[in-house]
Image (cartoon, grey):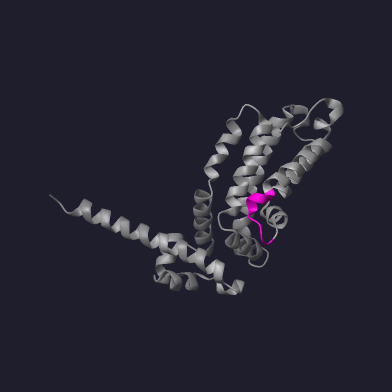
C-alpha cells in the first residue's frame, strides 16, 4: 500500500496546526500590543514560532491573517446563529435574535475586539478588514429592516436608510462596549440596546403608534 495518503494526511495536519498557531498568535498579540506598529506579520510569525514565509504562504498578507482571526472569532462567538434571525416568521423577533447574536460575538474577546476597532482607525489594512465585516452586519440589518417594512414603496426612502444606519450604530461594538462600562460583561448591555432599538423603531414613521405598529417584548 502506498504511504502517500498517510503522508498527505500528516502534511495537512501540520498545515492546520501551524495555521491555528498563527491565528492564536495574532489574537494574543492584539491583546498584548501597546502600539499598532507592533502588529506585523513578522511579530505574528515570531509569536507563533513559525517562519514569516509560512504566514505569507498560508494567509497571503496581514489582512489575510486578520480575516482568518475574525472568522475564528465569529465561529467561537456563535455568528452561525444569524440564520435563525432570518428564518423566524416574526421579523421583530428576528431582529432581537440578531441583536443577541451580535452581543455574543462582541463578547467573545472584548479586549481583542476593542483593539481591532481602535487599530482600524490607525492602520488602513486593519481598517479595510473591519469595514468589510461592518458591511456584512449592515447587509444583515438591511435584510431585517426590509422584512420589517415589507413595502416596496419604502425600499429606497430616506427613512429606511436612516433606520438601517441607526440600527447599525446601536448594534456596533462601540455601543455595547460603552453601555456595558468597564466593569460589566457586554451581555449586560443587551437589554439596554434592545430598548434603544424599540425607541428608534417607534420614531420611524412605519412604526409610529398612530400606525398601530409596535415591537412587542
Q: Is residue 61 left or right of residue 101?
A: left
Q: Magenta segment: does it hold 84?
A: no
Residue 160, picture quadrant: top right
At horizontal 43% and vertical 71% (from top left) the residue drawn is 52
Task: Give how far across and how far down residue 126 sits, in percent.
Answer: 60, 62
Q: Is residue 41 above or below residue 168?
A: below
Q: In this view, does 37 lie above or below 165?
A: below
Q: Is residue 60 above or below residue 96?
A: below
Task: Give how far across and how far down residue 216 sits, in percent.
Answer: 73, 31
Q: In this view, does 66 lie to the left or right of 1?
A: right
Q: Which of 135 and 83 is in front in this view?
A: 83
Task: Give how far across and how far down residue 114 sits, in percent.
Answer: 63, 61
Q: In this view, does 175 lie to the left or right of 208?
A: left
Residue 206, picture quadrant: top right
Q: Which of 32 and 49 is in front in this view?
A: 32
Name, please, the residue furthest toward the right: 210
Q: Quadrant of the C terminus?
A: top right
At horizontal 66% and vertical 54% (from top left) the residue drawn is 173
Q: What stretch is highlighted in magenta?
A: 182-189
Q: Which of 5 and 192 is in front in this view?
A: 192
Amino acid at each position: 500500500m502506498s504511504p502517500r495518503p498517510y503522508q498527505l494526511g500528516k502534511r495537512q495536519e501540520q498545515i492546520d496546526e501551524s495555521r491555528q498557531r498563527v491565528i492564536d498568535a495574532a489574537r494574543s498579540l492584539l491583546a498584548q500590543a501597546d502600539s499598532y506598529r507592533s502588529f506585523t506579520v513578522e511579530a505574528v510569525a515570531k509569536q507563533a514560532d513559525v517562519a514569516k514565509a509560512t504566514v505569507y504562504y498560508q494567509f497571503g498578507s496581514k489582512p489575510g491573517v486578520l480575516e482568518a482571526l475574525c472568522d475564528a472569532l465569529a465561529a467561537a462567538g456563535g455568528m452561525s446563529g444569524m440564520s435563525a434571525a432570518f428564518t423566524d416568521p416574526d421579523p421583530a423577533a428576528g431582529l432581537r435574535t440578531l441583536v443577541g447574536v451580535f452581543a455574543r460575538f462582541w463578547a467573545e474577546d472584548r479586549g481583542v475586539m476593542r483593539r481591532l476597532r481602535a487599530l482600524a482607525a490607525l492602520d488602513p489594512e486593519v481598517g479595510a478588514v473591519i469595514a468589510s465585516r461592518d458591511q456584512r452586519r449592515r447587509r444583515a440589518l438591511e435584510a431585517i429592516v426590509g422584512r420589517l417594512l415589507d413595502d416596496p414603496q419604502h425600499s429606497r426612502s430616506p427613512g429606511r436608510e436612516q433606520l438601517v444606519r441607526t440600527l447599525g450604530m446601536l448594534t456596533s461594538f462601540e455601543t455595547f462596549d460603552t453601555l456595558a462600562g468597564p466593569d460589566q460583561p457586554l451581555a449586560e448591555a443587551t437589554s439596554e440596546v434592545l430598548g434603544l432599538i424599540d425607541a428608534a423603531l417607534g420614531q420611524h414613521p412605519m412604526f409610529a403608534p398612530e400606525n398601530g405598529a409596535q415591537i412587542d417584548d
